[in-house]
Amino acid sequence: MTDHSHGATRRAFLGTIAGGVALSVLPGVSLADEAMVAAEIKKIAGDKPIKDGKIKLDLPSIAENGLVVPLAFEVESPMTEADYVKAVHFFADGNPSPMIASFAFTPMAPKAAAAIRIRLAKTQNIVALAEMSNGEFYRASKEVKVTIGGCGG
């Protein structure tokens, strides 16, 4: 007699994960939108102008699996005591919460860059906001189409 309990446990676990993903994109579940992202950005930047440029985003245009989407970035900066990136914030306009991640930097960092994996509930825009030591703000964004694990909408 073969013991299949390990396989059954794995199937139950995967079923639970799939159910969790489905719950995150049900019509009754509130998802962030562009207005919520704009409000979060305003909390950080206030009424200061936000320029395009300086941020290099490395995100796939199409994510085959919304549960694991690679995101890498680098912000152009000399990273000196007089001129450095203080923080980089990431937002998504289709996840349950608009804030995805924040990274803090000091002039001691050799460069303002990092890589993570994020979870996306559906096709949406990812927005990066870089806060510079001189009080300037820079923005970059990219749409990521999610095909699995988030309805692919």
Image: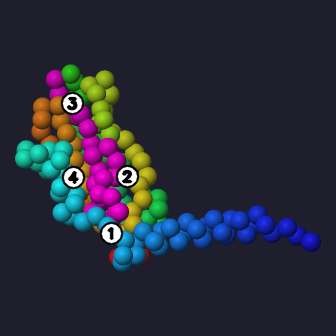
Relative to 116, say whether 67 is above or below.
Answer: below
Q: Which residues are magenta?
A: 82-102
Q: Amino acid at mark 2?
A: Leu
Distance between mark 4 and mark 3 Cα atoms: 22 Å
Mark on residue 10?
A: none
Question: Does dot 1 land on a helix, a strand or a loop?
Answer: loop
- According to the picture, the residue beneath numbered tag 4 turns out to be 40
Question: Does dot 2 land on a helix, a strand or a loop?
Answer: strand
Counting residues from the start of the chain, the first of labels 3 and 2 encountered is 2
Q: Position of residue 89 (x, y in %)?
A: 27, 46
Indicate the quadrant containing the C terminus: top left, top right, bottom left or bottom right. bottom left
Q: Are marks 4 and 3 in contact (CB under 8 Å)?
A: no
| Of the pair 81 and 2, the residue shown nearer to us | 2
Distance between mark 4 and mark 1 Cα atoms: 16 Å
Neighbourhood count class around disc 4 (C-alpha, 10 Å): few under 14, some 14–19, many 20 upward: some
Mark on residue 30?
A: 1
Question: Does dot 3 land on a helix, a strand or a loop?
Answer: loop
Give the residue displayed 18% in from the left and 36% down from the top.
Answer: 132
Q: Position of residue 12 (x, y in %)?
A: 66, 69
Give the residue displayed 15% in from the left and 50% down from the top.
Answer: 42
Counting residues from the start of the chain, the first of labels 1 and 3 encountered is 1
Q: Going by the picture, which residue comes out furthest to the right? A: 1
Distance between mark 4 and mark 2 Cα atoms: 20 Å
